Image (spheres, rainbow, N blue to C red):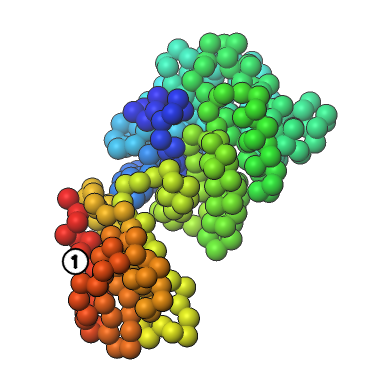
Amino acid sequence: MLGGVPIGGGAPVSIQTMTNTHLDDLEGTLAQIDRVRRLGCDIIRVAVPTAASLENFGEVCRRSPLPVVADIHFDHMLALGALERGAAGVRVNPGNMRNLDYVREVARAAAKKGRVVRIGVNGGSLDPDVEKEYGWTPEGLVASALKYVELFEAEGCHALKVSLKSSSVLTTVAACRLFAEKSDVPLHLGVTEAGVPSRGIIKSAVGIGSLLLDGIGETIRVSLTCEPEAEVRAARGILESCGLLEDGPEIVSCPTCGRTKINLVPMAEAVEREVERLRSEGRVIQLKKVAVMGCEVNGPGEARDADVGIAGGKGQGILFKHGEKIKTLPEADLLEALLQEIRNASV
């Protein structure tokens, strides 16, 4: 249990992101946490770069609506301070805490408080002995992780997660598959330094999605060079595409072609925004699929399994349900009719 969030043991895959505010902006940090919560984030990670940031970090832990994980590098005292101030968990990279006695001290403190530790192994900071033997390979990542799992468990710290991350999708996937063969410690999935959304979402979807479809992974973060809200949206999309998240409708829309006679793209975008708005308000949309189609080929024929949808024609279109036409409407009225159907299905 990470705060109130169950990890592993058949629990739903949880979504994590990381604040990109500075802890000296306490209210801004808390506001960002609340925004990602509304979008469906389950766990928030906060960088703790200095001892001076620990006071505000503690306040974040007290006021956050999500369990807070302290992101720690280099200095074990920061990990100990974060645990004292209420962190639900700490993420440490033992590869850049080279004194193993300090790492053991963190393990004992976490065990005593019943807190979770994520052992984060990255390609650029392997255990030196492991790197010498294996290099920056999947085998090296796994060997380093297993070494530290053994160390933490020897100190009585068993509430562990492991992440094995590289900016290479192939290395990340291979390492996670290999680790899953050797250990049942829960895995946190992600492709590190994935880049801007246009590239990073693709890399993350391929890497994280491949593993989830293999049944591997208990928590995920889509690491993007952008605001954390976009990370949460992308993570939700990956889980939905893998059939692991069913708390609202799947929105399908056609790719458009020369048969499209209506301005479909802004309609599809408006439907996405409205569904996100309703979700952020805590509303449950009692629909499984919503279709936004550009012509009679894709809808209602190919989209007959949609609970509700629209399909365009020349200057007009139809509203349909389960493949049956409900009514014909002018193009200007199509979007609002569909949005109202979605609202009516929301409780």
Residue 327: x percent and y percent? 20, 76
Left or right placement of residue 231 versus residue 122 in this view:
left
Q: Residue at x 55, y 32 (%)?
A: 187
Quadrant of the snapshot with the N terminus? top left
Residue 207: x percent and y percent? 60, 47
Under mark 1, the amino acid is Gln
Q: Which residue is mark 1?
A: 340
Q: Residue furthest bottom?
A: 314
In the image, residue 260 sits, relative to residue 171, either above or below, namely: below
Q: Residue at x 44, y 29 (%)?
A: 10
Residue 85: x percent and y percent? 39, 25
Left or right placement of residue 132 versus residue 260 in this view:
right
Left or right placement of residue 139 versus residue 292 in this view:
right
Say whether residue 54 is visible: no
Residue 337: x percent and y percent? 20, 72
Left or right placement of residue 90 versus residue 124 in this view:
left
In the image, residue 155 sits, relative to residue 186, either above or below, namely: above
Q: Secondary structure at mark 1?
A: helix
The residue closer to the viewer here, 84 or 323, is 323
The residue closer to the viewer here, 328 or 135, is 328
Total count of labels: 1
Say whether residue 170 is visible: yes
Residue 149 placement: quadrant: top right
